[in-house]
Image (cartoon, rainbow, N blue to C red):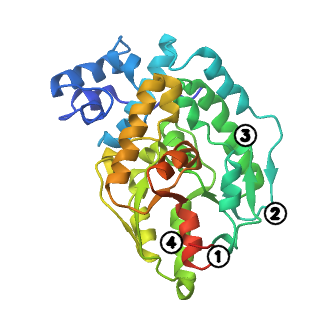
Amino acid sequence: MYALKHEENVCATCPSPDCLLKCQYMEFSKEDAHKEIMKVVRGEDSVVLKDCTTCYACEEYCSRGNHPYYLICERREEKGILTAPRPITNQWINMTEMQGKFMTGSVEDTVMSCCMLPELKKLGSGDIFAEIESSFVFGAEFMCPAVHTHFAKPSVIKERLPKVLERYKGLGVKKVVCMHDECYGTFTSIAPAYGMEVPFEPVYYMDYILERLKDLKERIRPLGLKVVYQRPCSNRLIPDKFPLVEKILGKIGVEVLNRTYDGENCLCCGDIVRAICGYQAADDIQKRNVDDMAASGAEYCVFNCPFCQSALSDKVSKAGLKPVHIIDLCKMAIGEKEV
């Protein structure tokens, strides 16, 4: 069985317990933050195990790479602490179960991973993705199982992720273009944290888009738009990729406006929080987030994750902003979609 690579002494000697000190959903003094994370490390009862909203942020806040979020999930499961009602937890386990109903295209050395989100296959089309559009995989057999951390079920990840990696290995692919942050985060953060070997090179889709925009530069017509960006929780697993958003938008003439809940201080879309912490907490998060967007003066709210877009599109529209995925903005800039 795979085990999380975590070093107690790294936490014990941490000069600043930012993993909890920066948390936006729990408040701690520096002293208490260190005490509570050490309780988690030692497997003791802690308020963290009760109140963590599973927003992934502590993975980014930990400058020592000691995986506090994964550890919290491990401790919760060890103690039988459910983050959501058991029927909801089981529903997610069951509806993402591998049943042999996956789809593959004309798989080549480089393949596009659409996870288990049909929207990603639609987004991964057109001239930007012309070279890999027909080389794709979709379905539970290729799904990143990171979602189960939200429900304190790392055991599901340890059971399913090796099967996903083996499935890719069986295809003989050399590169996997991950269309979902959670997939890329699974292959570059979760798998190494549990000592799993990834038999291919994961490629983040925004890196892929940047290269394609270079190829298509003659077709780019700057959009001249002012936008705000909804950073998804799964981007916390790959914070080094966050700067790519402004790089891409800068190439197509889109200005990202500053706001309170942005960057390291971003708020999640709220829908997973709804299942874990209830309607009041989720509604509060979404209201603060959308009000902050509206106050910026932006014309569009740019999304990265289809789940976030589904959760917030109606709300941002009512606030006077147009919801759009970053890929669709790129397609607008090269004339494939109307502005």
The 10 Å Cα crowd at callout 1, few under 14, some 14 to 19, many 20 or more, is: some
Occupied quadrant, residue 148: top right
The type of residue carrying mark 4 is Leu
Q: Secondary structure at mark 3?
A: helix
Residue in the foreground of this view, choosing between 35 and 235: 235
Instruction: Tell me, for residue 336, which label it has, or none.
Output: 1
Q: Secondary structure at mark 1?
A: loop
Name the image quarter holding the C terminus: bottom right
Q: Earlier in the sequence, mark 4 or mark 2?
A: 2
The 10 Å Cα crowd at callout 3, few under 14, some 14 to 19, many 20 or more, is: many
Q: Position of residue 154 (x, y in %)?
A: 55, 27
Instruction: Tell me, for residue 106, which label it has, or none.
Output: 2
Q: Earlier in the sequence, mark 2 or mark 1?
A: 2
Q: Position of residue 102 (x, y in %)?
A: 80, 45
Spatial separation of the CA atoms under disc 2 and disc 1: 24 Å
Q: Earlier in the sequence, mark 1 or mark 3?
A: 3
Q: Position of residue 333 (x, y in %)?
A: 54, 77
**Residue 46 vertical position relative to residue 140 in the rendered view, above or below:** above
Tag 2–tag 1 contact (CB < 8 Å)? no
* Residue ID for mark 4: 210
Tag 3–tag 2 contact (CB < 8 Å)? no
* Residue ID for mark 3: 140
Occupied quadrant, residue 5: top left
